[in-house]
Amino acid sequence: MKVAPFAFRQTYATMAVEANSAGPEGRDRREPSTSTVFSEKHRAKRVTQPTNQRRRVLSGMRPTGKLHLGHLVGALENWVQLQEKYESYHFVADWHALTTDYAGTSELRTNVQEMVTDWLAVGLDPKKATFFEQSKLPEHAELHLLFSMVTPLGWLERVPTYKEQLDNIRDRDLHTYGFLGYPVLQAADILMYKADFVPVGEDQVPHVELTREIARRFNTYYGRVFPEPQALLTPTPKLPGTDGRKMSKSYNNAIFLSDPPEVVAAKTAEMFTDPARKRRTDPGNPDICPVFDHHKIFSPQAVVDRVNHECRTAEIGCVECKRLMADHLNKSLTPIRERRRPYEQNPRLVWDVLDEGTRKARIFAQATMAEVRAAVKLI
Ligand code: TRP
Ligand code: SF4
């Protein structure tokens, strides 16, 4: 069989448009992308789900420990909204963490616990959505293996994040089989649950596109088992770290969801501002100030408008402006702190949520794998 061309740049643009225009509400969500020769063939066979069934979203996160404001506005707030309308599956991608951090796993358990505690603290609700741990479901590994048989090496070598990370991550050796196969494992995660939508940030769109390609190729060989999922681009407001760079644990510039109010205030007081505003009497430019980016997300509109004006006229000083921002940020974090308390006091509750979710996910995963094994003629 001819290997389908796989052009990330072009498909990425398509996906972004699709995600914005069709979105979860779009009736035309099943319209295939036109990037491969397989689309036409499968268009006719596409089945529509009964309308009384909620459509499914699935997304995973690597366990990096405590989550920060960037995770909140870039993913979690969106997940919290999605659980109201969709059948939601969210999982801890612990095997994915191993693809880069295989050499040091001593923190893995703590990282999982801290991350899922944050999930529950922001309002993700085990009564509404399913939360599980990838490594507790060997079905993911089995599907990954079968997908690895049909995934051309070229597709993986062309994934933009692959070369980028090989070049950028210098302190670890990423020339491994597992790291190259990262997107194949992700495809297994997504297709296992026949997800309609995958809420992700822009950087992950190529992985969802590759997932669609793998689904098509598998279906071509073995019959139609997998629907093609769509990326659901999370609109991400700009929220830099305290030093103005991208907020990241490794840059030491993050405000964590679990930071107590005094720590939030102290970190805010240290934040970078408009560097040209040296004296209190100098007018400032909020458009280039990370404090203002935070205001825009966490302060009421009236405060945003006031800062926007009074910074430019030097009516407000940076010290006061930061104090104001920290107050509103702390107000936004209060409900998160309250929801966190029971889980912090009794971490067993967190593991119970994962156990229960894993049990539910396993039923789905076993059904998919029975179908897959039959399709491949392994049974
Ligand atoms: N690769 C994703 C990330 O780094 C994590 C992930 C793994 C994922 N499997 C997934 C996301 C399946 C969505 C669906 O953020
Ligand atoms: Fe930034 Fe506020 Fe200072 Fe203006 S007044 S530079 S927005 S911290």
Image: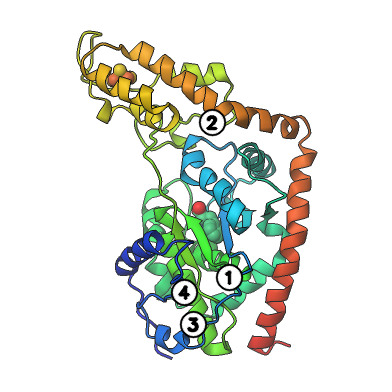
In terms of image quadrants, where is residue 163? bottom left
| Amino acid at the residue labelled 4 | Arg
Q: Secondary structure at mark 3?
A: helix
Q: Secondary structure at mark 2?
A: loop
Circle nearer the N terminus (1, 4): 4
Depth check, mark 3 against mark 1: the one in front is 1
Determine the residue positioned at 57% across, 78% down. 226
Tell me how far mark 1 sits from mark 4, CA to CA: 15 Å
Circle nearer the N terminus (4, 2): 4
Q: Looking at the image, is 131 positioned above or below residue 377? A: above
On residue 292, the disc is none
| Amino acid at the residue labelled 2 | Phe
On residue 256, the disc is 2
| Residue indicated by mark 4 | 30
Determine the residue positioned at 43% across, 34% down. 251
- State the image coordinates of residue 17 (x, y, percent, origin top left): 34, 63
In terms of image quadrants, where is residue 290? top left
Task: Give 335 or 179, whichever is nearer the viewer.
Answer: 335
Crowd class of label 3 (few under 14; some 14 to 19; many from 20; radius 10 Å): many
Tell me how far mark 2 sits from mark 1, CA to CA: 32 Å
- State the image coordinates of residue 309 (x, y, percent, origin top left): 25, 21
Mark 3 Cβ and ligand 1 under 8 Å apart: no
Circle nearer the N terminus (4, 3): 4
Quick one: quadrant of the N terminus? bottom left
Q: Looking at the image, is 148 positioned above or below residue 176? A: below
On residue 217, the disc is 3
| Residue indicated by mark 1 | 191
Task: Give 169 or 39, whichever is nearer the viewer.
Answer: 39
